[in-house]
Image (tube, grey):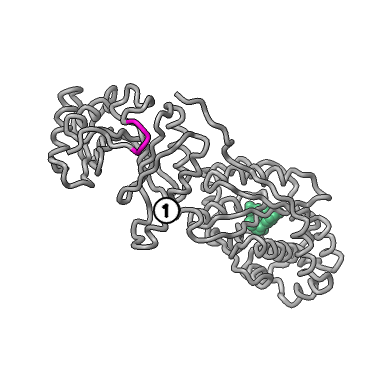
Amino acid sequence: MATTLDTAPGTTGRPAGAGSGPGEPCILLKLGEVVLKGKNRQLFERRLQNNIRAALRGLGDAVIWNRSGVIVVRLPGADEATQAEAAKRVGDVMGIVWVHRAWRVEKNPEAVVDASVRLLSGRTGSFAVKARRRDKRFPMNSSEISVLVGSAVQEAYGLPVNLKHPDNTVHIEVDQREVFVFTDGTLGQGGLPVGMSGRALVLMSGGIDSPVAAHRMMRRGLRVDFLHFSGMPFTGPESIYKAYGLVRELDRFQGGSRLFVVPFGKAQQQLKASGADRLQVVAQRRLMLKTGEALAHRLGAAALVTGDSLGQVSSQTLANLTALDDAVDLPILRPLVGFDKTEIMSEARRIRTLHISELPDEDCCTLLTPRQVETRAKIDDLRQIERRLDAEELAERLADTIQEHRPAAYAEKEPARA
Ligand code: ATP
Ligand code: MG
């Protein structure tokens, strides 16, 4: 039986950061979609590891271990603030269901008891011990560990046991090289690792819906780029600032995000000049999609994503959504199609985009909006308008005018080490 902590080559068993703790601090990650089997599972885990490493860039040399259904992240030598920052960041990495800040302790019963008792120091209320063994060779089984630790805690603090609704829970997980002990955890994002499902392009207004749509699709494993249409030169740059701020928030979930901005005002005017009238809004949206398709081909993106929700506004009736689908060959993913606005807003609050979306701006869509918007757009009429100004050619030219930005969530700066 191992009695000292096994560490990766080139590191020591007791790093400086361990300090006064009952072992070495680490982050224990529980994975989602465990139904995945075989090759897919390997792909999932490899992709996830790479994404975790990318999210931790700038926080020191992370050591990442894969155990069955669990990933262990160590930052040897990192101080408490850096460990906390790392735990926060991995909480935004798609594919992780639970994030636990845990202690790695030596693989013997005394060390486990000592760590558990220390972790409950200062706590009040009832407690429970939940033990499990991933390594069945450990000399005690789960209930024996629970009994041993439970009685030690009772003796130390006199806390009552409550197995059904405890105020505090000590989790003990016996692994191959060490035992993990922890009390609390935070929910991760769930879903699949970004990149596992390919690449898509999100049409991103400054509004509430499209950032939520982007988050939903990243969560299903798509790596996304963002495309924003501003009303420039007929509006100010405010909507671009909002799109930039939104992408910077969303970058927490994938890293390396790109925002492409198209000044769209003149093209909107051309649509009006070719007699779009009541069809102006739907015609604009079709031109956005066509431009998106031209860009998607250049980026190797296999789908477009929008924040459409059925019936939310007059441009989103079933007939109008059908007319939008007709504009492009690429599939249009609409993850919010069946969501109510209140549901979308609470999700926007949770992913921290709502406060940016609610800032005032001059949306390009409100430029040249007709007094009445057609709710049953006819595809033939739209195609006729588009023939007058050669929309395909215009979309290609718009894609040429694109400006690229890289709004990053985290600065690439090495923090001070402990
Ligand atoms: P949002 O809150 O996302 O702005 P919305 O309820 O305002 O959505 P619309 O303005 O009809 O609805 O837009 C529907 C979708 O069309 C948006 O979710 C977005 O995907 C796309 N879209 C609209 N305006 C723009 C824009 N200026 N730039 C890029 N995409 C846009
Ligand atoms: Mg909008």
Q: Main secondary structure of the magenta part?
A: loop
- Residue 307 quadrant: bottom right
Q: Tell me: residue 174, above or below residue 191.
A: above
Percent across and percent down for residue 301 are 60, 62
Image quadrant holding the C terminus, namely top left
- What residue is disc 1 on? 46
Residue plotted at (67% across, 44% down): 244
Residue nearer the viewer, 382 or 94: 94
Question: Which residue ends up furthest to the front in the rendered image?
Answer: 10
Q: Tell me: residue 177, above or below residue 31.
A: above
Image quadrant holding the N terminus, namely top left
Residue plotted at (74% across, 77% down): 380
Percent across and percent down for residue 313 are 65, 59
Percent across and percent down for residue 132 are 21, 44
Does 4 sit left or right of 239 as displayed?
left
Residue plotted at (26% across, 27% down): 120
Q: Tell me: residue 127, above or below residue 46.
A: above
Amino acid at the residue labelled 1:
Arg
Q: How many marks?
A: 1
Magenta-colored span: 8-12
Q: Is residue 55 visible?
A: yes
Within the magenta stretch, is there residue 9?
yes
Dot 1, crowdedness within 10 Å: few (<14), some or many (≥20)? some
Residue plotted at (42% across, 45% down): 188
Within the magenta stretch, is there residue 25?
no
Does 16 sit left or right of 379 as displayed?
left
Residue nearer the viewer, 56 or 159: 56
